[in-house]
Structures are given as C-alpha cells and as structure tokens.
C-alpha cells in the first residue's frame, strides 16, 4: 500500500486524538457507575487544567470492588480480546486494534514503528498517519 493509499484509509477511519480517547474512556466507565481516578501524566494535566505534554497511556485507579465490572466493560469494548502465545503458552492480550491505537499520540521511535507496522500488516489495520514518516524516510533512503 502506498503512502497516499494509507493516508486515504486513515482519513476514512478518522483521527484518533489521545485527549478525546482518554475522555471517552473515562466517561464510558463513569456512565457505567465505576468510580475512576486518573493517575500519572493525565492526572497532572487534569489538575493543572491544561494539556502539558503528549501521553503514551492513561493510568487509572479504581476501588477493588469495581475491578470485576471494569474487566467486563473493557472486554465489552474489545480492549481485552486479543489472544497470543509466549513460548507456546497461551496468553490474553489487548486486541491488536487497540494496541495500534495505544501506540499513537506520543514521540514515536523505530521500535514503535516496527511493532505497529507488524500488527497492521498481520491484522489488516490501517497504519496511523503519524507512522507514515517512517515509510517516507525509508523510501527516500533507497
């Protein structure tokens, strides 16, 4: 797939803004009566009332009594539907689609590119636009 085709595919699925993604997830959990506490970098931003830097993840804490419900809700949104193997042992994983989404919105490096490119190729997921610079860089070097 060319860079132009990949960009068009990404336009069809829409941008995935990390701030919107974080807010949507917290809203979803709270709408289902979960008591959610934001931690880490997003908590710093929330307390300061401004977005200070990019974030690679969203750290949350929930009271222990809400953990079973949290698992149900995340599974229902297909966050926890991946299955894989480590040295032949079957393990549960975050779904490939969500892994790709989680690998956006921060300063990306070659390791991120290799991981995301492999996931996108294996599972037929469009490569996020922010990774296209790695492809452009490689084609200009050849």
Image (cartoon, rainbow, N blue to C red):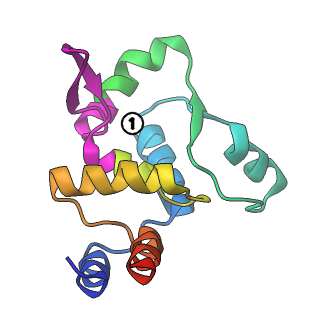
Quarter of the image holding residue 134? bottom left
Left or right, 11 with reference to 33? left
The x and y percentages for residue 104 are 48, 58
Quadrant containing the C terminus is: bottom left
30 lies left or right of 99:
right
Q: Would you call the spot at circle 1 few (<14 residues within 10 Å), some (14-19), or many (20 or more)?
A: few
The image quarter containing residue 1 is bottom left
Res. 24 visible in picture: no
| Residue 85 position within the rendered picture, expressed as x and y whole percent measured from the top left | 22, 22
User: Which percent across, then down, holds residue 20?
Assistant: 51, 62
Q: Toward the viewer: 82 or 76?
A: 82
In the picture of the structure, the residue carrying the numbered disc 1 is: 32
* 76 within the magenta span: yes
Examine the rendered structure and indicate whether residue 2 appears above or below residue 106. below
Q: Residue at x 50, y 55 (%)?
A: 110
Farthest residue toward the bottom? 4
Residue situated furthest right in the rendering:
48
Question: Which contiguous range is marked in magenta?
Answer: 73-98
């Amino acid at each position: 797939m060319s860079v132009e085709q990949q960009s068009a595919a990404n336009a069809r699925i829409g941008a995935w803004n990390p701030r919107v993604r974080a807010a949507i997830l917290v809203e979803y959990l709270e709408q289902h009566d979960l008591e959610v506490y934001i931690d880490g970098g997003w908590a710093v931003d929330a307390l300061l009332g401004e977005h200070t830097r990019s974030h690679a993840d969203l750290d949350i804490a929930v009271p222990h009594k809400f953990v079973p419900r949290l698992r149900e809700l995340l599974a229902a949104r297909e966050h926890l539907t991946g299955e894989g193997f480590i040295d032949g042992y079957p393990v549960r994983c975050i779904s490939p689609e969500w892994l790709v989404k989680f690998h956006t919105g921060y300063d990306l490096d070659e390791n991120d590119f290799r991981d995301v490119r492999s996931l996108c190729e294996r599972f037929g997921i469009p490569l996020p636009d922010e990774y296209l610079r790695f492809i452009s860089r490689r084609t200009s070097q050849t």
